[in-house]
Amino acid sequence: MKRNDTEKEKGILIVLSGFSGAGKGTLVKELLNTYRDEYALSVSMTTRAPREGEQDGVHYFFTDRAHFEDTVAKGGLIEHAEYCGNYYGTPKAYVEEQMAAGRNVLLEIEIQGALQIKKLFPESLLLFVTPPTAAELERRLKNRGTETEEVIAKRLSRASEESEGMEAYDYIVINDDLQACVKELHGIVQAARREPVRTKAFIEEIQKELKGFVKGE
Ligand code: 5GP
């Protein structure tokens, strides 16, 4: 939809939510690998402690509550929420940069943040990732082996609460077969980029051009 070489079509903002253990992380990794230049993943700031193997600046920007609150006060986050006793938020600068460069920016965030994003950016695309069944979710959480029984129970109870909000999303993505799911997700994004709500600039431009052809009535 580029109108000339200097004009770059902006990327869209994609919110990816889903139950903890739904496989969002793997899905995102695969999406970034498969469609390299088309997507960028936003790295969130959090006050939760790093899990084994997690690196600062790669998985999250790990910080304390005082610095997090200071960043919020300075307007450095586009949204933030408290989840299971920890703060999580999306740094603003990277999102704006990547969208301007034409990439679709993925925010892997929970529902409170997703709803804030939709309110602030009505043209954002809200996707909810879920395993095919609740039993499969429990199995994946247990297999992860990084959480205690207590944390697993907390996350399942949170999943039950979150399932009440699934209808607020634009699409539900069922993550059963990973490769099929990646393809489906990319297909949804491509179609979404052509919806009128996300092609306003194009529509306005072509309307203006067409008006130029209309002779005075
Ligand atoms: P985890 O601790 O398992 O990495 O993440 C817990 C939850 O916080 C997940 O649902 C994850 O998607 C969400 N989350 C991660 N980053 C952000 C963020 O920047 N904002 C919001 N609202 N949620 C986030």
Image: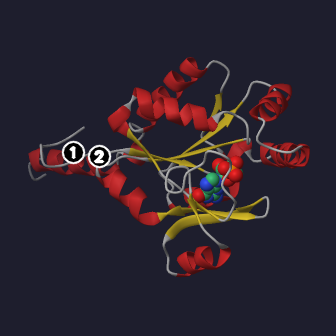
Left or right position of 106 against 85: left
Q: CA distance from mark 1 to mark 2?
A: 5 Å
Front in this rendered view, residue 213 or 71? 71
Q: Residue visible at 47% across and 31% down?
A: 31
* Residue 37 percent across, percent down from the top left: 33, 37
Q: Secondary structure at mark 1?
A: helix
Front in this rendered view, residue 115 or 48? 48
Q: Residue visible at 78% across and 64% down?
A: 85
State if disc 2 and disc 1 touch (CB < 8 Å): yes
Left or right position of 41 against 116: left
The N terminus lies in which quarter of the figure?
A: top left
- Identify residue type, mark 1: Ile
The residue tagged 1 is 206
Q: Is residue 110 visible?
A: no
Q: Quadrant location of residue 89?
A: bottom right
Query: Could you classify mark 1 by the number of other residues whose Cα lies within 10 Å: few (under 14), some (14-19), or many (20 or more)?
Result: few
* Residue 141 percent across, percent down from the top left: 79, 35
* Residue 94 percent across, percent down from the top left: 40, 59
